[in-house]
Amino acid sequence: MIPEEIIKRIWPKIRTKHLFPELPIPKVSESRENVALEMKNKQITINPAFSDKIAHKMDVEEVIEALLDHGISHYTYCPWDFHTHLRLFAEAKRIVKDKERAKRAAGLFMDVVADTYCVKGKKTPLPELYKHIDKGKVDEVITSLYQRIWGVDLCAKEDREVVRRLARIPYLDKKQWNKSIQKFSRVIKVLLEVEEEDRQEGSQANPMGEHGLDGYTLEEIDQGLRNFANQNVGLKEFKETFEDFEDELKEVGYGMEGGMGRGEGNPLDADLIYYMKLAENHSIPIKKLPMEKRGFLNPHSHCPWEIGRPFQDVDVWTSFGKIMPGITQTWNKIEGSTFGEKESVPDCIIIIDSSGSMTNPRKNLSYAVLGAACATDAYLRNDAKVAVYNFSDAPMGGKAILNFTSERDKIYGILCKYFGGGTALYLNELDPLLEASREPDIFIITDMKITNLGKVIGYLNNIDNRITAVYIGENTYSLRFREAMERKKNISFYNVTKREDIPKIVLGKIKEYFRGNL
Amino acid sequence: MKNPFDDFREHRTREREIPLDSIIQSRDRVMSKIIKGYEKLLEEEVKELVWLVQYNTVIKAYTLAEKAVKEFDYKAEDIEEFCYELESTDKIPYLITGPAGIYISALCNYAQEEEVLLKLNDLKTQINLIGYRLPVGKKVAVEGNMGDFTGIGMEGGELVVEGNAKNYTGAGMKSGRIRVANNIGLHTGEWMMGGEIFVGGRVRGLGKIVDGKVYEDEKLIYPRNYRQSNVYY
């Protein structure tokens, strides 16, 4: 029977066995001879050459069932999602210190977990497949591990010392996976080094297929990166892990959206992605522009007309057509409240300090950049545009200006720029930005150690736009700024000393919503 | 109306016992006993969180450790795992490298295996006193850097360190062999009564050696070319 027909016949049974995973029916396609199966965008593809190769040792139907059990267990149990994949890779890399070996270690670990999960919980011909499959040195060790932990004779030569150590790892305890993969990598580290030396160029390391990023959708990759950034990994570790996967991410088209045409494309910037993903995890609320009072006076209630009061307010219908004190009624008018426009979020100018007193965002986690990134994210989510004024010693050229845009990459690019010089603002340069949009909000984030702080206070005192001032750490300058601006009702202050302070910022929150009272 | 769960009616979960389950259970049992023994040692020994390496304190701590480890069976892999558990705060309240080293030494000395391999390259802490009183017929091989007082009071065993060792290595050792692949610190072989110390790299300083031999990069530096104690080379 040809493999397609076998798949059609056994697929319902396999789906039931794995509790109906949301996967399309697997396909059959000739590919590299020594790869048994591939998974791209949830589509499992089985290589018939592989099943043909061991057909004389094992029933083809069983081979296909075993391969599908293997592939589906990866999907339903380990790694399950891209975040787990990244996490396992990062832990393995800590031990083996090499990108390729860490990928291989993570791949092997995921295989052991997924296969053991399947063998323990489901009726599967996987052990039979491992008995007959062609194996390299490391695969032989893994098979002998299976032999030990599954209690099945797989005719594998056992390296007692290694297998004894590997067999002590709690593969099915998800909570311990981080520790477990470290132990696993520690044991197989030497084997991987030997394998790498022995491996011929172009040969496939894993006969069951490698664990690339093809299996994940772009949304899953995005979510995985977001979770990974939020998992208390530092900028350095995120950057390192991201760069290890950079080529594969580009291959699957991550960060290349809208890139029609030709050309190499921009390199993915790990720093930007880190702040982007962190910002997506910290959502900051924005107060939309509130209902405003308009100048129109509307009739509200009646009162008796008195001599000397204007005639135009007389209500002729309730006065019976007479002008007589006591009978004639006149309208009391009050100012009407109405929506001037539909509630919306204005654009925002982000003023960010990147002077020497601030943290370099490309070396360590910068609260200023993270705060600004969160603000950017909040405004862009609300269909507003963002302009950036990144300053250090602006009069000396230490500045970067970006006009209103909704292009996230460009905004983050400017936010992550670090000048590291003195701190002075060239205030006139803000005017064109203020004029370029209708009453944009201003979000300023700095440690307030600004040389011309007096001028800045004066400038901000003279504008009525909503201002969110975030100062990093407490110092005399921030105190001075706060004292000078406290009476202004269009400004709100926030102090950030730790990462947890950032979500507490409410953008555009002003003490008095009605601009007329300012 | 069709029951939406009908499709699952015939599904039977087939959770079967595999040898991995029993391996993990027994490993967890042993580990909790080892940890309990260590906690007991800390309770007895380090009441004020300060522990000084003194002749009497070391002997007393070792006696307690010996008593604890004799009460259960364990394997060489359990010792290595315990070394890593020492760094995880969720299981062990605090790591004090002195008593920890004595406890690990007792575990090695009373292990069923004649040879104990400890792959400790990824351990962030350098543990002191590894190899204390290592008896004849026992070999402990450690991958990674060790702290102070490595192999002190050795009693005929073989201690191999694939890394560096700090000060007072082999102090008071009676017999046996210490091999350190890389460098070694000050006071090497202080009050050493016998045995040999082989250092692959540099010896930073020798202690007051009574008897025994010290080799640096395969050259005998004690007693043939006697060097002043604690001379910085």
Image (cartoon, coloured by chain):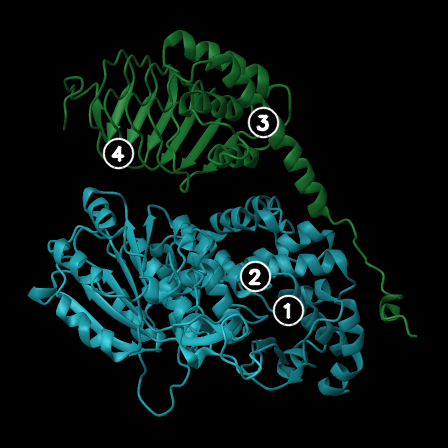
Q: Going by the picture, which residue comes out furthest to the front?
A: A324
Q: Residues within 10 Å of mark 1 (few under 14, many from 20)?
A: many
Label number found at residue B183? 4
Mark 3 vs 4, N-terminal side: 3
In the picture, which quadrant includes the C terminus of chain A?
bottom left
Q: Residues within 10 Å of mark 4 (few under 14, many from 20)?
A: some
Mark 1 vs 2, N-terminal side: 1
> Element at badge 1?
loop
Looking at the picture, how far across and down is residue B176, in whole percent?
A: 39, 21
Looking at the picture, how far across and down is residue A327, in whole percent?
A: 55, 73
The hue used for chain B is: green
Between the C-alphas of marks 3 and 1, the distance is 41 Å
The hue used for chain A is: cyan
Give a yes or no on whether discs 3 and 1 share a subunit: no
Mark 3 vs mark 1: in front: 3
Q: Going by the picture, which residue comes out furthest to the top?
A: B56
Q: Assess whether mark 2 and mark 1 are in contact (beta carbons under 8 angstroms).
A: yes
Residue B184 quadrant: top left
Residue designated by label 3:
B34
Residue designated by label 1:
A133
Between the C-alphas of marks 4 and 1, the distance is 46 Å
Q: Decide if residue A474 is on the left or right side of residue A13.
A: left
Name the residue type under label 4: Asn
In the picture, which quadrant includes the N terminus of chain A?
bottom right
Q: Residues within 10 Å of mark 3 (few under 14, many from 20)?
A: many
Q: Going by the picture, which residue comes out furthest to the right?
A: B1
Work out whether residue A245 can be spotted. Answer: no
> Element at badge 4?
loop
Residue designated by label 2:
A139
Mark 3 vs mark 4: in front: 3
Looking at the picture, how far across and down is residue A173, in whole percent?
A: 63, 49
